[in-house]
Amino acid sequence: MTDTTMDQWAEWVLHRRFGGDEAYMKSCLGDLYAWRDRVLANAEVVEGDVFLDVGTGDGLIAFGALPLVGERGKVVFSDISQDLLDYCEALARRMGVSHRCAFVCASAEDLSALEDASIDVVAARSVLIYVADKQRAFNEFHRVLKPGGRVSLFEPINSYFGCPPPVGYDQTPVIDIAGKLR
């Protein structure tokens, strides 16, 4: 990450997301931590797991997973923004946990940098809403998951499940799993 410029995702996540308002940021962090904790609880993370955070951003979910996977586990930070990955890697080094982390620049639709059946848990928070080919992303999640692996997602679009789909949201490709969402 350069000191003077960063990509649009990093600029937004690290500098503009809260509009420069520290009080607003603090009020939002409580909600963000609650969603992080819910994603992690639903993932049923256990010590020794290999945990993939797709669209890691500033690492909220991934850093929360580190204590859960323990010293024998590993957390893979994945994002399309190399600047955000560099930020997370620097933070992991400062925290002394980088030996339990991997940093992969990849989109949700192309996780080819990861081996088949190499991941115990795939998690994502507010990522799929930005993914054009959701089916391809789900195919990639399935490919990298070990047998019996788990997926835990939080998406603003989840509120549409259980209701007639709004115009433009075709649930057909995921209708079988829609009922399994917590």
Image (cartoon, helix red, strand yellow):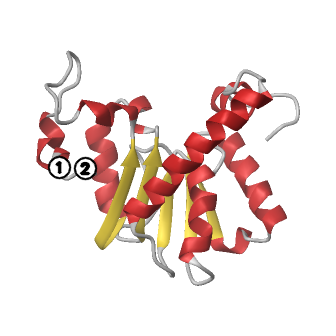
Of circles 2 and 1, the one toward us is 2
Residue identified by numbered label 2:
181
Q: Is residue 88 above or below residue 74?
A: above
Residue 84 placement: quadrant: top right
Asked if the residue at tag 1 contacts the one at tag 2, i.e. Cβ–Cβ closer than 8 Å, the answer is yes
Nearer the observer, 37 or 1: 37
Q: Position of residue 68 (x, y in %)?
A: 55, 73
The kind of residue tagged 1 is Ile
Which quarter shows the N terminus? top right
Q: Position of residue 40 (x, y in %)?
A: 47, 60
Q: Is residue 126 above or below residue 165?
A: below
Nearer the observer, 48 or 18: 18
Q: CA distance from mark 2 to mark 1?
A: 7 Å
Q: Residue at 71% of width from left, 41% of height from top?
A: 83
Q: Residue at 69% of width from left, 26% of height from top?
A: 18
| Left-right relation of 128 to 28 | left
Q: Secondary structure at mark 1?
A: helix
